[in-house]
Amino acid sequence: MPFTAADLNLTDPTKGYFHFVLYAEPQNGAAGAAWNATISIERPSMYSREWMNRLQRCEPDTLHTTLVHPQKMPSLFQPCVDEDPDSPSALMGSGCTCRRTWTDPLFGLPVVGEHYRTVGGQIDQWTYFTYAPLDLRPDDVLSAVVIDRDSGLFWARTSTGDLALLPMSNSQGYDVGRRGGGPGYFAEYLHQVVASNGRDTAIARQPYNPDVDPNLLAWVSSPHSNRTQELTLPDLKAIQRG
Ligand SMILES: [Zn+2]
């Protein structure tokens, strides 16, 4: 089924999840995202901390289970070793492989944290999993795009200052600093945002476009793009002019 913007209006945005399409094959026990890109945050950054600071811890729900391997779903409901040394997720009283669940109150997407602490605690880290939305909220206007090389992620800043994961398709991940499909998809997205003055923020309508703006494509393929930076719409327009 071809993607159209109307397909995004699946839920009441005042009540439900924004711009997320659930994919399920009940007969095979498979559930997850078909269109939305799955995001993992392993390396914290200034931007990922800003995003994480607004997350609200919550009880696991159906969408959290789609971010966990089916055999690991019970761990969503087990306490951390810090809360219960006898938790089924605890290892010898100090190691831990628990999960924690949050929701992003601004964009309604589920977030699962995966704890990995070795016995004795020499390694103690959290990895966070969520989905990129297929679009921002209905009235959002994008004011800046963030290339976050510290976490390896791409973010959108709205005109009201909110930070969101940049809308991204499962099959069209973004990249910078080289030639190839990832920078091509990113240039296509930037072109769409610039052409609409920040109002068209949905994932690109079509697969990689060979006629993408040459100045944007040259820039995202160059070393100049390969550092952490927040690019406003005027910045992007200046890059497009060459
Ligand atoms: Zn834990």
Image: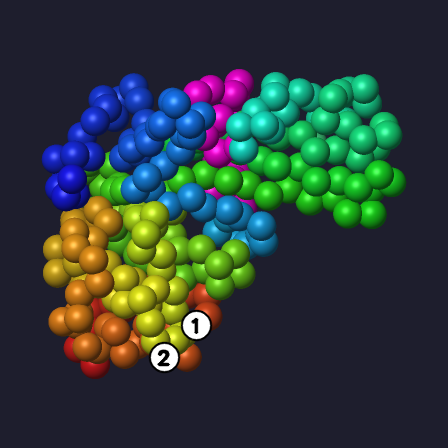
For the residues labelled 1 and 2, the Cα–Cα distance comes to 7 Å
The residue type indicated by label 2 comes to Ser
The stretch drawn in magenta includes residue 38: no
Instruction: Check whether the beta carbons of the residues at disc 1 and disc 2 lie within 8 A of each other.
Output: yes
Instruction: Residue 222: give its label.
Output: 2
Q: Position of residue 38 (x, y in %)?
A: 42, 44
Res 131 → quadrant: top left
Q: Is residue 170 visible?
A: yes
Element type where label 2 sits in the image: loop
- The range drawn in magenta is 49-68
The stretch drawn in magenta includes residue 50: yes
Residue 148 against residue 84 in the figure, above or below: below
Residue furthest to the front in view is: 27
Residue 200 against residue 61 in the figure, above or below: below
Check disc 2: other Cα within 10 Å, few if <14, some if 14-19, many if 20+: some
Res 30 → quadrant: top left
Q: Position of residue 60 (x, y in %)?
A: 52, 21
Color scheme of the displayed model = rainbow
Residue shown at 59% from the left, 28% from the top:
71
Residue shown at 27% from the left, 62% from the top:
185
Return the residue at label 1. Answer: 226
Q: Position of residue 122 (x, y in %)?
A: 83, 47
Left or right: 231 with respect to 124?
left
The residue type indicated by label 1 comes to Asn
